[in-house]
Image (tube, grey):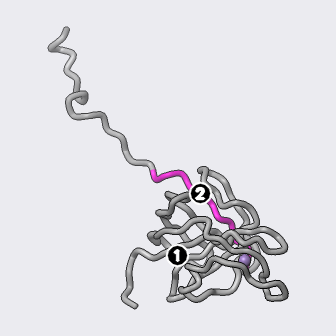
Amino acid sequence: MPHSATAIFVIQKHYATHLHYDFRLEMDGVLKSWAVPKEPPMETGVKRLAVQVEDHELGYANFEGTIPRGEYGAGKVEIWDKGTYMLKSRTNEKIEFILHGTKLQGDYALIKFKGDKNWLLIKKKAAKTLQKPPRHLRGFDNTKTG
Ligand SMILES: [Mn+2]
């Protein structure tokens, strides 16, 4: 697979014993996956626990349906959001990315906070752009108007 700055993400709402959202990022040729017990954040500043779970195959990104009773993760799975993302930075403790989904859009980060599996999924404030006034409003010359 050619390396690309843009990869897919998917969030599958999973009506298992405990409802959760499986947040998956295409990374290293697989879907890196986190189980998020509450609805992923759409508002800036909201943090959600995200427990890393086993990688899934890329093809699983399209899965919707019902995992039969008796099987691991039994219950309905539906795609809650899907789109592409741009990776901004990645270390063992922090992954920063921009989501381009239907529900989730903008700057997000996953930050490890405890042990190997516990991360926080955070919607970050959009990077501030330096706002300059338009040229015709800059350098106003008082001497001309008195
Ligand atoms: Mn699940």
Of marks 1 and 2, which one's residue comes earlier in the chain?
1
Q: Is mark 1 within 8 Å of ligand 1?
A: no
Q: Is mark 2 within 8 Å of ligand 1?
A: no
Which residue is tagged 1? 90
Q: Kindly identify the residue that appears in the image at 37 percent across and 45 percent down.
A: 130
- The residues tagged by marks 1 and 2 sit, at their Cα atoms, a distance apart of 16 Å
Give the amino acid at mark 2: Lys
Q: Kindly identify the residue that appears in the image at 79 percent across and 87 percent down.
A: 72
Q: Residue furthest bottom?
A: 1
Image disc number at residue 136: none
Q: Quadrant of residue 113?
A: bottom right
Q: Is the residue marked by circle 2 packed among few (<14), some (14-19), or many (20+) residues within 10 Å? A: many
User: Which of pointers 1 and 2 indicates the residue nearer the eye?
Assistant: 2
Which residue is tagged 2? 123
74 falls in the magenta region: no
Q: Is residue 50 visible?
A: no
* Magenta segment: 117-127
Q: Nearer the viewer, residue 30 or 47?
A: 30
Q: Is residue 141 above or below residue 21?
A: above
Q: Is residue 137 above or below residue 64?
A: above
Q: Quadrant of ligand 1?
A: bottom right
Q: Is residue 106 above or below residue 110?
A: above
Position in image of residue 29 (x %, y %): 50, 89
Q: Kindly identify the residue that appears in the image at 39 percent across and 48 percent down.
A: 129
Quadrant that contains the N terminus: bottom left
Position in image of residue 98 (x %, y %): 48, 64
Count of labels in the image: 2
Is label 1 in a helix, a strand or a loop? strand
Q: Kindly identify the residue that appears in the image at 62 percent across and 75 percent down.
A: 93
